[in-house]
Image (tube, rainbow, N blue to C red):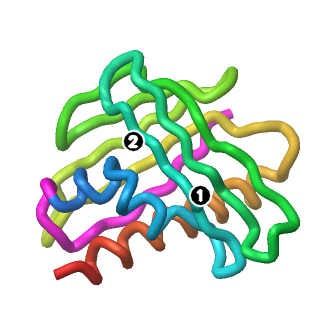
Amino acid sequence: MKITVETTVNAPIAKVWSAYTSPEDIVQWNSASEDWHTTLSTVDLRVGGAFTSRMEAKDGSFGFDFSGTYTKVVPNALIEYSFGDRTGVVEFNPAAGGVTVRVTFDAEHEHPVAHQRNGWQAILNNFAKHVEGQH
């Protein structure tokens, strides 16, 4: 089963793309709630390149690496990747006043679909807020 989340970011495509693919930006926006954060991010943005985001609870109780391999990269338009036995697609589409960022990913079986959708949507909302807050 695939899950899709999206948001519209009121910023130019170059700024949106850079913030989505830059480790320095990723550690600032990549969390689903205030009690989590990303402590480390690496990005090798090319087909066959790897990425990792170290996500941790701020109280130190839990952490995990979200990592995978890029399978397709079209600058300012599309990123496809695999992570474990799952895949994800990030689309960057021009929209009124900015860019619609749509993320589609394979659901996992451990957590309810609504929980997964809400978590990924929260991360995407943080992303939009981060980009729009930059000057």
* Quadrant in the picture for the N terminus: top right
Asked whether 5 falls inside the magenta stretch, the response is: yes
Which residue is farthest top?
Answer: 48
Determine whether 79 is above or below 14 in the image: above
Q: Is residue 76 left or right of residue 92?
A: left
* Crowd around label 2: few <14 · some 14–19 · many ≥20 (10 Å): many
Which x, y percent locates residue 69?
49, 24
Check if mark 2's residue and mark 1's residue have beta carbons within 8 Å: no
Question: Residue at position x 29%, y 59% from top?
Answer: 19
Please, what secondary structure does the residue beneath circle 2 have?
strand
Position of the C terminus, as image quadrant, is bottom left
Give the quadrant of residue 116. Answer: bottom right
Q: Image point 59% across, 58% down: which residue?
A: 120
State the residue position of label 2. 90
Query: Which amino acid type is shown beneath numbered disc 2?
Result: Val
On screen, residue 109 versus residue 1, left or right, reads right
Residue visible at 12% across and 63% down?
Answer: 12
The residue beneath circle 1 is 120
Amino acid type at image mark 1: Trp
Neighbor class of circle 1 (other Cα within 10 Å; few <14, some 14-19, many 20+) is many
Residue 68 in the image: x percent, y percent? 56, 29
Tell me if residue 48 is in the magenta stretch. no
Above-or-below relation of 71 to 87: above
Q: Residue at x 75, y 68 (%)?
A: 57
From the viewer's perspective, is residue 17 above or below residue 49? Answer: below
Q: Earlier in the sequence, mark 2 or mark 1?
A: 2
x, y percent for residue 121: 55, 63
Magenta extent: 1-14
Q: Which mark is residue 132?
A: none
Count of numbered badges drawn on the protein: 2
Q: Where in the figure is residue 10, as x and y percent of width and height? A: 21, 73
Distance, label 2 to label 1, CA atoms, is 12 Å
